[in-house]
């Protein structure tokens, strides 16, 4: 309060308070007991009694906190003294004096009872506010046979317990799968092996930090202005309701939209791109941020299927549409008798990985197998992904090492060389510029390991939008 207390009393009695001043006075009376007590005393000071009596009949308190709500200890003797002095010095009518007396007595009684009420409240000294426990945000479910680490503030929690996950919790999927489902709307995050995720407090919508691994998010419709957010090491993904997958690596983030739409922003320079269903993008620290649309997906030696939300052709369909598959030795379609690690049983991904074509070298003439693929494509920019699994039934000594060439350029060496038995990998993306209406690709055994028979399970080709 910038003005003297007596000035506020005068303005109050004279009705000289605008709306802003009324609000300021009301706030002071509520928040400052010392000011409220003094205001009540000043209200009946002799210097103001004359002004009060001159307009007492029309006096209406202008604050939402009238006189009978003021707090503080009563000063009955002082109020009576002021009234007696006023009556001696000003011979007013008995009616007016009676009205003033009623005003003073009402004020005194109101202040007294308010004071008694305040006195009844216990006073706790040296008390500190208790910490508010963080609310539960989601439930964690771990699929059978999976190994998951769950920590809160560095303290390990049992991932099989009925506890609910809270902001700050970190979840690591060491192998297998885990699902994190929000309690508010059943938004579900499906975490695959190698995933590291930390729940963040809503800001204002749901938010997680995903530092490594691969997840698929099925996001329920979110309120406008409260998007679901996923932050990786170099990107921020925002959605209002969709299905999408993320692969977070040390230097890149891959985002693939299965349904709906997603906004992706690079953290380093706030460059952004909008993705629709079927679109994909890779975010790196620098470089162009581009949206890519699936041009072709092929399941080699397998049936048509849906991978990452995109419809793929069978190899036969692809060959009917112009794809040419050749080998330098003997080609063989192969159905694996082993299942891939960390893949949901019966899923399209499992079926695709268990099918492949292989360049067999039965004659053992030290040739080393080579698979050549030629695919007609309109000229333009493309990105290529390949899938394969270490499926040798002869043990670890019969592992493969494969070199990849795209448009006669060596783009990858030692594919599968570091994969344990039954492990699989999605290789890529490999960017290429097609200028002659055809994509040329070859897989060749590099002969550093025992098995000189390259193979391939799946291929996806994306075109720049």
Image: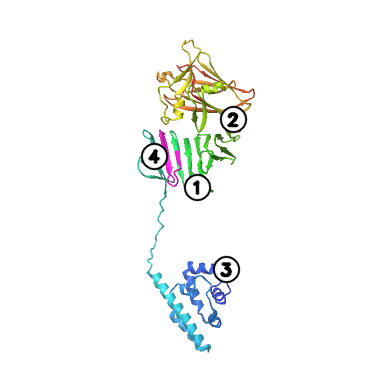
Magenta-colored span: 167-189
Give the mark toward the camera: 1 or 2: 2
Q: Does 294 sit left or right of 418 as displayed?
A: right
In the figure, residue 118 lies in which quadrant?
A: bottom left
Determine the CA span between mark 2 and mark 4.
37 Å
In the figure, residue 264 lies in which quadrant?
A: top right
Please state the horizontal and vertical placement of residue 195, each as a whole percent of the image: 45, 36
Classify mark 3: helix, strand or loop. Answer: helix
Determine the CA span between mark 4 and mark 1.
22 Å
- The residue that label 2 is drawn on is 463
Say which mark, if any, is on residue 141. 4
The colour style of the image is rainbow
Question: What crowding class fits label 4: few (fewer than 14 Cα within 10 Å), some (14-19), or many (20 or more)?
Answer: some
- The residue that label 1 is drawn on is 205
Q: Earlier in the sequence, mark 1 or mark 3?
A: 3
Classify mark 2: helix, strand or loop. Answer: strand
Question: What crowding class fits label 2: few (fewer than 14 Cα within 10 Å), some (14-19), or many (20 or more)?
Answer: many
Residue at left offset 41%, top offset 20% = 396
Please state the horizontal and vertical placement of residue 119, each as a whole percent of the image: 39, 70
Residue at left offset 46%, top offset 29% = 349
User: Which is nearer the eye, 238 or 132?
Assistant: 238
Q: Earlier in the sequence, mark 1 or mark 2?
A: 1
């Amino acid at each position: 309060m910038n003005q003297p207390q007596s000035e506020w009393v005068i303005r109050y009695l004279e009705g000289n308070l605008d709306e802003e001043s009324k609000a300021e006075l009301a706030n002071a009376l509520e928040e400052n007991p010392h000011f409220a007590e003094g205001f009540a005393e000043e209200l009946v000071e002799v210097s103001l009694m004359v002004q009060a009596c001159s307009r007492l009949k029309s006096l209406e308190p202008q604050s939402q906190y009238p006189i009978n709500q003021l707090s503080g200890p009563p000063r009955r003797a002082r109020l009576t003294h002021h009234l007696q002095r006023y009556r001696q010095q000003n011979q007013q009518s008995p009616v007016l004096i009676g009205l003033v007396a009623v005003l003073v007595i009402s004020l005194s009684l109101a202040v007294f009872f308010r004071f008694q009420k305040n006195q009844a409240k216990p006073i706790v000294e040296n008390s500190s506010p208790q910490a508010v426990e963080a609310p539960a945000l989601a439930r964690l479910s771990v699929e059978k046979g999976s190994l998951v680490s769950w920590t809160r503030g560095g303290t390990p929690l049992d991932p099989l317990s009925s506890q609910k996950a809270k902001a700050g919790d970190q979840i690591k999927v060491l192998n297998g799968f885990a699902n994190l489902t929000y309690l508010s709307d059943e938004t579900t995050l499906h975490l695959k092996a190698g995933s590291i995720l930390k729940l963040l407090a809503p800001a204002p919508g749901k938010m997680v930090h995903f530092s490594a691994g691969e997840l698929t998010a099925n996001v329920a419709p979110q309120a406008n202005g409260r998007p679901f957010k996923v932050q990786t090491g170099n990107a921020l993904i925002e959605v209002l309701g969709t299905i999408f997958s993320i692969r977070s690596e040390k230097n890149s983030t891959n985002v693939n939209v299965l349904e709906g739409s997603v906004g992706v922003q690079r953290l380093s320079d706030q460059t952004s791109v909008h993705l629709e269903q079927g679109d994909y993008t890779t975010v790196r620290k620098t470089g162009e941020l581009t949206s890519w649309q699936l041009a072709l997906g092929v399941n080699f030696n397998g049936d048509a299927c849906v991978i990452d939300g995109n419809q793929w052709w069978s190899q036969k369909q692809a060959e009917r549409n112009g794809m040419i598959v050749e080998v330098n030795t003997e080609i063989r379609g192969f159905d694996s008798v082993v299942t891939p690690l960390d893949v949901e049983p019966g899923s399209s991904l499992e079926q695709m990985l268990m099918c492949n074509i292989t360049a067999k070298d039965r004659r053992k003439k030290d040739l080393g197998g080579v698979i050549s693929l030629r695919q007609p494509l309109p000229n333009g920019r493309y990105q290529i992904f390949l899938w394969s699994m270490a499926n040798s039934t002869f043990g670890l000594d019969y592992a493969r090492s494969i070199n990849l060439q795209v448009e006669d350029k060596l783009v990858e060496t030692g594919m599968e060389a570091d994969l344990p038995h039954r492990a699989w990998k999605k290789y890529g993306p490999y960017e290429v510029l097609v200028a002659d209406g055809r994509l040329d690709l070859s897989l060749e055994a590099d002969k550093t390991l025992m098995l000189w028979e390259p193979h391939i399970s799946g291929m996806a080709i994306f075109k720049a939008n």
